[in-house]
């Protein structure tokens, strides 16, 4: 059974249809890439899954349970963690306090929460900065902090919104390795929104492509990038050449 | 990762100097009315502690949870009126009235908070001003609670049970000290508890707080109720101390703003900020009022406002923030 199943989800903003009967499934242990040009409805879909926007139609199920009508905090408590496209750390708190807030979902005791938080900070390699203020972190570090914070709520599924957005090129390989380890070492399932095609190709087991709010392709990365509709909508003809040799 | 696991460290224990300073401060506060027995100084001490209590209560909601209320006089008035009305119409002890006032204010704050918390930031603050003014106007026109004439409480024999003291007025000082100490103790505990972490998370970023499973509206309401209850306790104390209340003295917008300003000067979201703010600004306002007040020139308000401007421009973290910075350097 799929861990997450999205079926026929529609979200309108006035006359604009941001998501039009979007359906796809995420299997347990999978890394699913979500691609599409700006305005394709990727982030809206995230917000609908997370409970920030109620869908106008359709159904979202997580482990068989419907998520429609749940608030974001309830969605998190059933086992879905997330990061933000524009990072949102708790700026006025230290790095470790950021993660402690999340870890406290499972313990009211600050000392236990602190011990938990250290583990996740070590995992994202930010433990050395635990007592610095979140404000003084670079964008890449903030992205890792958000991942640690989301993981500290002990989700089964992690939704990552543009992990490499605004991050300098040298940092990208570290983040990719980290995403791989989130699955292999923490055993999480991931849905990743990403603009960088090289990134999404290298980490995804499967890719879902959105265009103007609709799913235009769903399959293994190598197959999706060869789809005519994906090339027309997103990649452009220039992309056709390298895929032939690289795969 | 090249380096071994980072050694786990418990939160840093307080320095010995800080502990000594704290004990000395506590002793000074307890000994104050015995060292300065004159009524004027005793009254000043009571005012400082009352405002420190109100400021700390406001700080729980605004400082830790980030919800700026400019209508907290409502809860002060609710506390003052609840204990007074219960005493006058049902003969309830002021102590029971004080507890009842805290409860009524907490419930009332949730009723106000539920719709107002749909608004964010400045809009929430504006809504609380509106609520404050509405309640103020209602109180003026509500005959059952004395309308604009207010309520006069009967003078009773000196006793702890009656909450009235004439021979030894310093007892008022210790009552308000106990109330303020309780509020500070709860805030101290809050800083170290899950509630405190959740409130600070909500203050820093409500959307992110929600994403890690915090039901933000519920926690805002908890902060609001706690805050309102302690402000109401201050209101009941005030009614017993003066034995006369009217809407203009317990519901004014100026009181709501003063509470906020004390915390801003002392340090928003810090444990000692409200005390520092009250200990500095209340005597200052008394002093400038005595020196320059009543002349119609408003020099006292000019000095007061000028000081606030200086703090806002040069030290937005308040005086506690300034101490912290100096200690680090």
Image (cartoon, coloured by chain):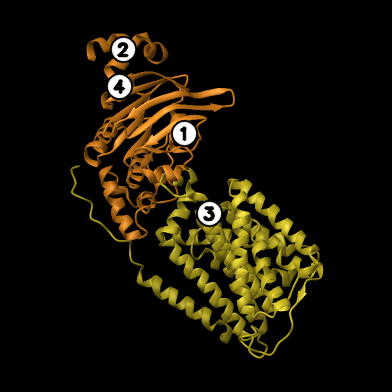
Circle 4 SS class? helix
The numbered disc on residue A226 is 2
Question: Please, which chain is the residue tagged with disc 1 on?
Answer: A
Colour applied to chain A: orange
The numbered disc on residue B220 is 3
Q: Nearer the viewer, mark 3 or mark 1?
A: 1
Question: Around disc 3, counting alpha carbons within 10 Å, would you say few (fewer than 14), some (14 to 19), or many (20 or more)?
Answer: many
Question: Please, which chain is the residue tagged with disc 2 on?
Answer: A
- Check disc 1 and report the residue beneath it: A48
| Tags 2 and 1 both on a single chain | yes
Q: Which chain is yellow?
A: B
Position of A99 relative to B222 (above/below): above
- Check disc 4 and report the residue beneath it: A198
- Examine the rendering and report whether any part of residue B117 can be seen: yes
Question: Please, which chain is the residue tagged with disc 4 on?
Answer: A
Separation of residues labelled 2 and 1 (CA atoms): 29 Å
- Examine the rendering and report whether any part of residue B294 can be seen: no
């Amino acid at each position: 059974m799929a861990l997450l199943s999205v079926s026929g989800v529609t979200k309108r903003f006035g006359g604009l249809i941001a998501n039009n009967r979007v359906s796809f499934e995420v299997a347990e242990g999978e890394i699913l890439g979500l691609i599409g040009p700006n305005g394709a409805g990727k982030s809206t879909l995230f917000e609908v899954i997370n409970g920030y926007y109620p869908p106008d139609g359709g159904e979202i199920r997580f482990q068989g349970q419907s998520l429609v009508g749940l608030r974001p905090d309830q969605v998190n408590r059933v086992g879905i963690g997330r990061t933000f496209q524009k990072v949102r750390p708790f700026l006025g708190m230290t790095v470790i306090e950021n993660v402690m807030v999340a870890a406290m979902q499972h313990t009211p005791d600050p000392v236990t929460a602190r011990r938990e938080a250290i583990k996740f900070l070590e995992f994202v390699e930010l433990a050395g900065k635990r007592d610095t203020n979140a404000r003084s972190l670079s964008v890449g570090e903030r992205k890792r902090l958000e991942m640690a914070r989301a993981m500290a709520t002990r989700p089964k599924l992690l939704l990552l919104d543009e992990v490499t957005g605004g991050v300098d090129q040298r940092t990208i390989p570290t983040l990719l390795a980290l995403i791989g380890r989130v699955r292999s070492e923490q055993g999480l399932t991931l849905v990743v929104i990403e603009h960088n095609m090289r990134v999404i190709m290298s980490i995804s087991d499967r890719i879902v492509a959105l265009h103007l709010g609709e799913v235009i392709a769903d399959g293994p990365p190598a197959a999706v990038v060869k789809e005519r509709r994906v090339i027309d909508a997103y990649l452009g003809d220039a992309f056709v050449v390298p895929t032939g040799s690289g795969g | 990762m090249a380096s071994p696991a980072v050694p786990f460290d418990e939160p840093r224990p307080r320095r010995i100097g800080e502990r000594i300073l704290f004990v000395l401060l506590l002793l000074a506060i307890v000994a104050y009315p015995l060292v300065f027995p004159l009524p004027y100084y005793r009254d000043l001490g009571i005012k400082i502690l009352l405002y420190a209590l109100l400021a700390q209560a406001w700080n729980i909601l605004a400082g830790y949870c980030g919800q700026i209320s400019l209508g907290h006089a409502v809860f002060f008035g609710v506390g003052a009126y609840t204990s007074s009305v219960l005493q006058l119409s049902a003969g309830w002890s002021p102590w029971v009235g004080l507890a009842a006032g805290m409860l009524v204010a907490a419930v009332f704050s949730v009723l106000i908070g539920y719709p107002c918390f749909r608004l964010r930031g400045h809009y929430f603050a504006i809504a609380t001003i509106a609520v404050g003014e509405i309640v103020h106007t209602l109180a003026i026109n509500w005959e059952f609670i004395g309308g604009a004439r207010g309520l006069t409480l009967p003078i009773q024999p000196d006793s702890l049970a009656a909450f009235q003291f004439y021979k030894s007025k310093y007892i008022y000082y210790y009552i308000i000290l106990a109330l303020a100490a309780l509020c500070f103790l709860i805030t101290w505990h809050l800083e170290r508890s899950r509630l405190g972490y959740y409130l600070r998370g909500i203050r820093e970023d409500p959307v992110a707080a929600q994403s890690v499973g915090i039901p933000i509206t519920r926690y805002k309401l908890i902060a609001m109720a706690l805050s309102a209850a302690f402000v109401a306790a201050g209101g009941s104390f005030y009614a017993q101390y003066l034995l006369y209340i009217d809407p203009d003295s317990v519901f004014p917008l100026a009181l709501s703003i003063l509470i906020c300003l004390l915390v801003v000067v002392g340090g928003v979201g810090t444990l000692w900020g409200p005390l520092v703010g009250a200990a500095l600004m209340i005597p200052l306002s008394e002093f400038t009022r005595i020196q320059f007040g009543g002349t119609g020139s408003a020099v006292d308000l000019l000095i007061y406002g000028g000081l606030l401007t200086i703090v806002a421009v040069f030290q937005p973290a308040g005086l506690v923030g300034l101490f912290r910075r100096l200690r680090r350097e």
